Amino acid sequence: MMDHIGKALVNSLLFSLVGMGVFVAGFFVIRWLLPFDVHKELEVDQNTAVGIVIGSFILGLALIVAAAIHGP
């Protein structure tokens, strides 16, 4: 029983780290792809549309990571 819980805990931590790494890498990729400064648009100009695009990208990436973790 404890062995099963230990394996589940290690898997959870591993998948959490991998998922967060994918999100960070994805955010840098989207910053690189967009033709404007994301930081300026979000924080200085408070551009809601850019926030929605970034949020949609993160949600899509979350669905992909969740499907990869869950499997068939």
Image (cartoon, rainbow, N blue to C red):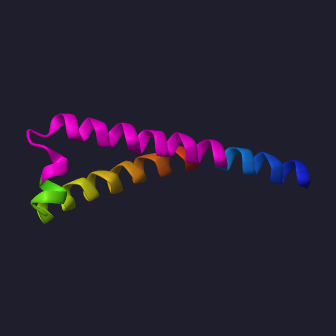
Q: Give the range drawn in magenta.
A: 13-40
Instruction: Work out which residue is located at the far right of the displayed protein and give it.
Output: 1
Foreground residue among 63 and 55: 55
How many numbered marks appear? Answer: 0
Looking at the image, residue 1 sits to the left or right of residue 8; the answer is right
Residue at image coords 78%, 45%: 7
Residue at image coords 65%, 47%: 13
Magenta span has 22? yes
Looking at the image, residue 7 sits to the left or right of residue 3; the answer is left
Instruction: Work out which residue is located at the far front of the displayed protein and give it.
Output: 44
Q: Where is residue 41 in the image (x, y as percent from the top left)?
A: 12, 54
- In this view of the protein, can residue 50 be seen by the observer? no
Q: Where is residue 37 in the image (x, y as percent from the top left)?
A: 13, 43
Judge whether 47 appears above or below 16 on screen. Answer: below
- In this view of the protein, can residue 52 be seen by the observer? yes
Q: In which quarter of the image is the N terminus?
A: bottom right
Looking at the image, residue 7 sits to the left or right of residue 29; the answer is right
Residue at image coords 84%, 50%: 4
Judge whether 21 appears above or below 48 on screen. Answer: above
Name the chief secondary structure element in magenta.
helix
Q: Where is residue 63 in the image (x, y as percent from the top left)?
A: 41, 53
Image quarter for residue 15?
top right
Magenta span has 21? yes
